[in-house]
Every structure is written in C-alpha cells, then in structure tokens.
Amino acid sequence: MKKKILRALVIGAMLFGLHTTPTLAMETSDDPSDFVVIADVVPDVIQEIRYYSTYNFVGDRVDGYAQPVALLTKEAAAALKNVSDYVMQYGYRLKIYDAYRPQKAVDNFVRWAENVDDTRMKDYFYPLEDKRFLFDKGYIALHSGHSRGSTVDLTLFDMRTGKEVDMGGTFDYFGELSHPDYVGELTAKQIENRNFLRNAMIRFGFKPLEEEWWHFTLKDEPYPDTYFTFDSSMFAGAEHADQRLKDEMLMAVLWMKNAAEYRELCYQAYNIALERVEQAVKSKRKSKKPLAIVLDIDETVISTVEYNALYVDSKVTSSIADQIKWGNETKSVPMPGAVEFLNAVDKKGVEIFYVTNRKGPELYDTTFNDLTEAGFPKVKPGHLILKGDDSDKGPRIATVEEKYDVIIYMGDNTNDLPLGVYGKMTEERNAIVDRNKKDFGVKYIAFPNPIYGHWVRAMADGYQKMTPQQKEIVRKNALRK
C-alpha cells in the first residue's frame, strides 16, 4: 500500500475519547485497496449509518458520507463476521452505526465544535456538557482512530423483539453514561446487555474503549499508524459507482464531439496517411503483392461519439442489441477527413481492409451499411473483417499480410496495430510503443480516443470482470503511479 507521510502533531485525545499517545509523525494514505464493504463480508448486519443522516450530534449529514455505506479493513471485517455468527446463535444481529471515517468527516466535526452557537442537537447528545469545552474533554479532536479503518461503532439488535437491545444509553452520547463500566441508574439487564456485546467483541479480537460502550477496535489492526483520507462514497452501490464511471467519460465525449482540436488531429492523421500512400504508389514499391492499407472502423473512420454520449446519459447500454438498434436507426457519421482519404486511396488502386472488433456476424450488416451510408468506397468481399471469439487483431491482420503488402496501419487503439500489445499491461504496452517510436507517422497512424480502449483494461488484471466499485478503485490507484 502506497502512503504519503504527513508531519503533524496529534493534539489531544482521539474523537469521542479514542486516546492515543501523541506522536510527531503520522502516516496518511488515500489508497482504499485493503478495504471492503462490511455488508459484503457480513451480510447479516443491520446498518444505520448515523452520519449519513441528520440524526447525529452535528445535526447535518457529515462530509464524506455521500452514501450510507460502512467500510472496514479486510482483517477487521473478517473478525466482525465471526462476531456476527456468534451473536446470531443468541438471536441477535449486529447493528452498525459507523466504521471507517474519512478525514473530511473529522474535519467537519472540528468545524462544528468551533461553532459554539450551533447547539441544535444538545438535548439529544450532550445535555450535560458545555459545547465550549468539548475539545478540552477530548470528545472532539483533530484525528480519529476510525480513520485507521479497523474501528467500528455498533450495538445489538434483538430479532425476537424487532428492536435494538437496551444498552441504557444512546450512541454518541457525550458523558459518563456512555462508559461501558458505568453503573449509575442502569438496570441489571442493561449492564448485562453491555457486557454481552463487550465480551463477544473481545472474544473475536476486538478491544473496547473505556469511554464508549459501542466503540471497538481490532486488537491487531493492520494499519495502527495510518490514517486514511479517501472518500467512502467510492464504495457505494454498483449502480452509483457505474454512473460515476460514466460521469468520468463526460469530458472525453464532449471533447471528441465539440473540440476543434479533435478535428485537427483527425485531419492531420489522414493527411500524413495519404502522403504515405502516395509515396508508396509513386515509387512503385517493389512487391509481388498488391498494396493495401489496414484500418480500424470505430473512432478511425466512423464516429460513435453520439452513441457514447447516449451511453454516458444512460440512454443506451453497451449490449450488441443496443448497438444494432442504434446503427440501424441512426445515420452513420464519418470521422473528419475519412471519406475523402479513403476515396483517394481507392482511386489509386490500393486495397482497403477494415479490421474491427465489432462483433460478427451480428454486426456485419449494420457495419456494412454504416460504411456505405457514410460515402466510403464500396466494401469488397472479404475486406470487412469483424471479431470472432477473440479481440486480438494480430491473427486477423496477419491473414491480410499473407496476400498483400500493407503500406500503413491505422487505428485509435494500439491493438489496431501489429505491435503485439494484446493482453499486455500498461507499462509493457508503453514500452513496446516506445521501441517502435520511429514508425509512428510512417508505418502506423494513430487517432485520439480518450473515451474507451484496451488502455483502460491494461491498468489491472481482470479489469473487465471487476465490479464498478473495483474499477473505480483501480482508476484512483492509477493516478498515483
């Protein structure tokens, strides 16, 4: 796990009595890769993430809680699963109030504490305390042990009564009533309930906090000195995460749809390509094979920007059925300069081969019609090569090379070029391109496409099969490499 070192003096106690020894060095990290959603590991838990609602001591939804999702480190979640299985035998479920807490939430608490005039929730959470002294008493601090990822706030839920177990006090109450060993006016049953929860948590590796009956930290926490800063919302439900991934495409789609700079790059690519073809024809390139060019279709000769705009707006999916429907109902839009280029190539007697990863045979007719409608030269039999079971274009390109002398290869994806990058990860793909740098603009012509491509899946093994949440984490991690 990559970490960034922050020099800081940890002042006072940890949030809500989580005391630690002050240190001059504190590690912070924004890497969420060792965290999991509690409900994914412990499906029997009940969640009431208080800081996602307004029913908490602040009185507002707290920063960093954009979604009601509770996270822990993998180790803490696994231990909590054991606790859950244990209490289930007695007719209880665990009810989670809070777990991982990003630093922005702690900062929110600090701002609230500094605003002594905001006492909206005083009667519920600190009726006996003066808000001016919450810092002095250690209820509020600059850093929270929750940010280390192995601390959880929870209670028991009785499945027989359908109610929370009576602990003789409420979550986040500031005062002695919250101490686990408080006796005061508590009944014997309330004390018994507190002890049952405490003993169950200790039994499976958690240590309690002497100031809060609901607060427990994994004894052998994996990151005892690291405070995490990532926003927990990136672990939201798959639907929300999927939409965020689409939102990330928005500027790329807008750039390809509207930017003059995008059109400039397309014209530039076709001008260079035509110059290479003319040179080959003029020099009567010595070859026993007829001359040809090999090129991709989408984002190389046909624009699918409008389709991707609908995808970002959740109006279509990536399914073949939607692609066929869109292709049949929408007039195909050629790339800037593509029609003129290919007609010029055709007039010079150079063969044109389209090697695309549109899936065949389902999309053959749609693709053939797209090229015809756009005004490209008539597609000859065998010159439109769609994807079968494999996305690797190398073998398909090799079949063309057996009978033709290929002048140039053109595409928006490095896999469109016979460079052997298929299945390679980011660093190796880049290294291969670097080794062939002299051939770009000569033998290989590349087009800009920031929307999609094999470069995305090259960021992590198994990317295509990941959940939206996992993909989001991969993208965040790639920013730090």
Image: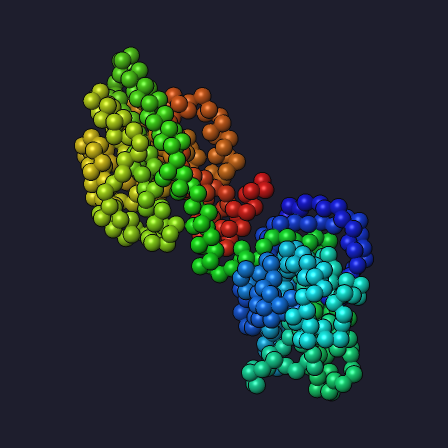
The quadrant where residue 84 appears = bottom right
The residue sitting at 72% across, 64% down in the picture is: 116
Can residue 308 be seen here? The reply is yes
Seen from this angle, which residue lies furthest front? Answer: 117
Tell me residue 346's x, y (percent): 22, 25
Tell me residue 45's x, y (percent): 57, 72
Q: Is residue 278 above or below residue 45?
A: above
Apparent side of residue 144 relative to residue 90 in the rendered image (left or right): right
Q: In this view, does 195 lie above or below 412?
A: below
| Tag count | 0
The residue sitting at 39% across, 35% down in the picture is: 259
The residue sitting at 49% across, 50% down in the picture is: 471
Can residue 205 be seen here? The reply is no
Apparent side of residue 418 relative to residue 469 in the rendered image (left or right): left
Apparent side of residue 399 relative to residue 144 in the rendered image (left or right): left
Nearer-the-camera pick, 290 or 122? 122
